Image (cartoon, rainbow, N blue to C red):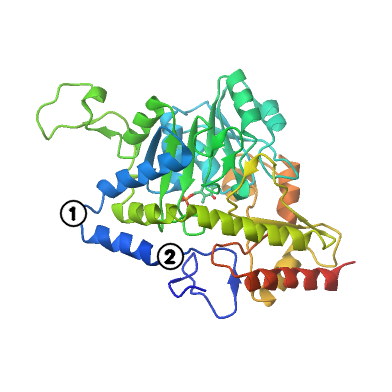
Amino acid sequence: MDDNIPAIAGGTPIRENKIYYAHQYIDDADIKAVTDVLKSDYLTCGPAIDRMEEKLKKITGAKYAAACSNGTSALHIVCMALGIGEGDEVIVPPITFAASSNCVLYCGGTPVFADVDPKTYLLDPKKVEEKITEKTKAVITVDYGGQASPLPELLDICRKHSLKLIEDAAHSIGTVYKGLGAVGSVADVTTFSFHPVKVVTGGEGGAITTNDPEVYSKALLYRSHGITRDRTFMEGESEGPWYYEQTGLSMNYRMTDIQAALISSQLDKLPEFKARRQEIVRMYDEAFSKIPGITVQQEIPESDTARHLYVIRVQEGAFEIDRAGFFDALVKENIIPNVHYIPVYLHPYYRHLGYAPGLCPEAEKIYREMITLPLFYSMTDSDVSDVTEAVKRIADHYRK
Ligand SMILES: *Cc1c(COP(=O)(O)O)cnc(C)c1O
């Protein structure tokens, strides 16, 4: 492993012989990019932000890009920009990080959960259509694990019902939907996250891309308090060079130039990140196809995927142990997996809002069986075979 790798995502130091489910990769170019900013005049709102946004536009093919503090604020900004409010329903998948639906609640709207496809774990367009009412304003789709969502079908549904399609691409920077374009240029608006477990990191960080100038200008407004210094958006007359106006209500959701420089430097490595992740996925797919009782996430052929998560399912009833037992057995093998995700509506906060188990049966079944295995750029081939051998050993030992 590279000497520059400092600490496991989440702050736990890497311990000898343990392979964690995710890890950032930081090289000398990244460190130089950050120290260059530290020696410059701007730590925030400076030129590194513009450079990072330009790079993101190039990679995604989107007309506009706005950096912000993290993937969660990106989703909140987007919901504000689209005018989501009380009485509005937004359709979301349940197998995701809570931020994907919390953003609707921040705005006073109602998340409506639609089930996922049992093979791809992506939002199922047919289930989306069943959930549309006269209150539906938007659909948030999640590129689970890095795969592109079924974008043509979702776009068709959204156009037919005059809904906005928001793509939560926290997992899928670098993914291309063949024939349609890169993630970030296809949906009405796309959000990204640069948390250390994701494919590209800034420590923390987020971004919004869109081809819609109105959504873009509102995103700029809502990433910084609802304040504008742009004369075209002011309601009154300028009173002098100091003058600005608050025309909306938001928070400080800005990214620092330090983060932007790190993200820019990481984006330069995205092709290599993507290729290595694809290589590891191929090795995993090959190994697990030979282990009865273990299934893997199916790739949709149209998605040229920069894979973020590698998830296996431990089929219920196939082994003497359940998912939790399988998870513990992996930890004993020094492999530290994770589970992505607990269906959002099963969390106590959502239960108190009235959501109940049984809402999305496919998602609940996937959740009961899933385990996220290690997948990160700096994994060696021998790390990969350590993981596949451990899964095989455990499966063979406990198979009924
Ligand atoms: C990580 C993640 C987010 C939130 O991103 P942060 O940068 O951590 O705020 C949102 N949605 C999904 C699907 C994620 O995985």
Position of 330 compared to 316: left or right?
left
The label shown at residue 41 is: 1
SS for callout 1: loop
Q: Position of residue 174 (x, y in %)?
A: 52, 47
Q: Is residue 320 left or right of residue 251?
A: right
The quadrant of the image that shows the C terminus is bottom right
Name, please, the residue furthest toward the right. Answer: 400
Local packing at callout 2 (Cα closer than 10 Å; few below 14, some 14-19, many 20+) is some
Q: Earlier in the sequence, mark 1 or mark 2?
A: 2
The numbered dot on residue 194 is: none
Quick check: is the Cβ at mark 1 less than 8 Å away from ligand 1? no
Q: Nearer the viewer, residue 251 or 335?
A: 335
Q: Is residue 76 above or below residue 256?
A: above
- Residue 53 placement: quadrant: top left
Pinpoint residue 378: horizontal percent, then vertical percent. 54, 67
Please tell me which residue is depicted at 59% across the width and 24% down the height of the picture.
158
Which amino acid does the dot numbered 1 rest on? Asp
Residue nearer the viewer, 187 or 333? 187
Measuring from the top left, give residue 304's x and y in whole percent: 62, 45
Amino acid type for the residue under numbered disc 2? Ile
Element under disc 2: loop
Residue 194: give x, y in percent of width and height: 45, 52
> Outermost residue, bottom direction?
16
Residue drawn 45% across the image and 28% down it? 82
* Residue underneath mark 2: 26
